[in-house]
Amino acid sequence: MYDIAIVGASGLVGRMFLKGLEEYNIKISNLTLYASRRSAGKKLIFKDKEYEIIELKEDNIGNHDFALFSAGGKISERFAKIFTQKGTVVIDNSSYYRMYDSVPLLVPEVNMDSYNGELLIANPNCSTIQTVVLLKALEELEINRVIVSTYQAVSGSGRNGINDLKRTLKRKNPLFYPYAIANNCIPQIDKFSKDGYTYEEEKMINETKKIMDINLTATCVRVPITNSHSISVNIQFNKEFDIEDVKNRLKRFPGIMYYEEYPVNEMSNDQDYCLVGRVRRDYSQENTLHLWCVADNIRKGAAINAVQILDRIIKEKL
Ligand SMILES: NC(=O)c1ccc[n+]([C@@H]2O[C@H](COP(=O)([O-])OP(=O)(O)OC[C@H]3O[C@@H](n4cnc5c(N)ncnc54)[C@H](OP(=O)(O)O)[C@@H]3O)[C@@H](O)[C@H]2O)c1
């Protein structure tokens, strides 16, 4: 039995952590729900029992076996180490620690073997997770380079994103995105960095390199969809491939659900799989493949990936 804490329990990802802990049948002796002062005193249900949210403060942090963090980078920066100093394994959903050399960046189907008992673990960016799952399925074919274009749902911005879609659908001004997300695709996720890339694009590029040592470039776009991110992926291999072999590798890989035609967002909502379709040869250059992938960004792209890491650590005594 494990003492488990959730930081950011009232958020979209936080609530999904709760669902995931139940679905993955994690044995819990004590559950503590932290959020900001705004949510303190509110109650959430876990396995038919009510739990009160408490305010996250330095002086009320308990001794937990595991803490699942999803309250943004600033909260992770300020609090994650306080938890690890008490011996708690922290699985952090924010981007804050992802590129630290000492912090493993884990996707269970892809690189669980790189985990060496560290107390601080990072969950990759939502779009990175679904990308590396499908790249792992094709890794033996020797990937040279990858180009990704994303079509990312508003739930990826948490409650702010969903509220902005609802507001702008009613023709009210946006409060969160730079333009009305209703009726627009916005080719900007997060701030702009050097050379015209956004932070979201840099996260995908750097995280894929850290997890799989693959050269990838990305254009990340926010679209007026409530949930599940879609990605268009173009992969150049170092050598010739057989299209049926590619399809069979995708069909066999744990974590992928293969579609001979294609999946759409509503098929992916509430699933833990990465749904892959539109697999076809790119005739514009040698050894190149196109495909389409959809995944639930709150589940596999965030909360469930973290719960799967926790589950593997417990089951495999890592
Ligand atoms: N949504 C996704 O697809 C996704 C994917 C990967 C990673 N993430 C990351 O996960 C994090 C949260 O995402 P979300 O979608 O769940 O956002 P959200 O729905 O807006 O929830 C934010 C959570 O953070 C808590 N929080 C904010 N300020 C806090 C403070 N000062 N102290 C303690 N808790 C605080 C909020 O508590 P209150 O209710 O009290 O405000 C709430 O529980 C972000 O870092 C995001 O980048 C999200």
Image: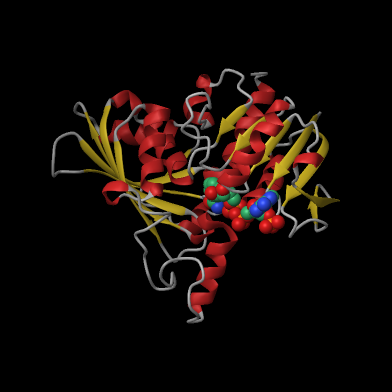
Residue located farthest toward the bottom when viewing the structure as drawn: 171
Is 57 rendered above or below residue 174? above
33 sits to left or right of 79: right
228 sits to left or right of 22: left
Q: Residue at x 46, y 32 (%)?
A: 99
Q: Residue at x 58, y 46 (%)?
A: 74
Question: Is residue 270 in view?
Answer: no
Figure quadrant of the N terminus: top right
257 sits to left or right of 150: right
Quadrant of the image occupied by residue 180: bottom left
Figure quadrant of the C terminus: top right
Question: Is residue 165 in view?
Answer: yes
Query: Percent x, y for residue 295?
Result: 48, 48
Q: Residue at x 58, y 30 (%)?
A: 121
Query: Percent x, y for residue 237?
Result: 23, 31
Report the front residue among 32 and 87. 87
Q: Residue at x 80, y 50 (%)?
A: 54
Query: Percent x, y for residue 311?
Result: 66, 30
Is 108 rendered above or below residue 274? above
Report the front residue among 62 and 246. 62
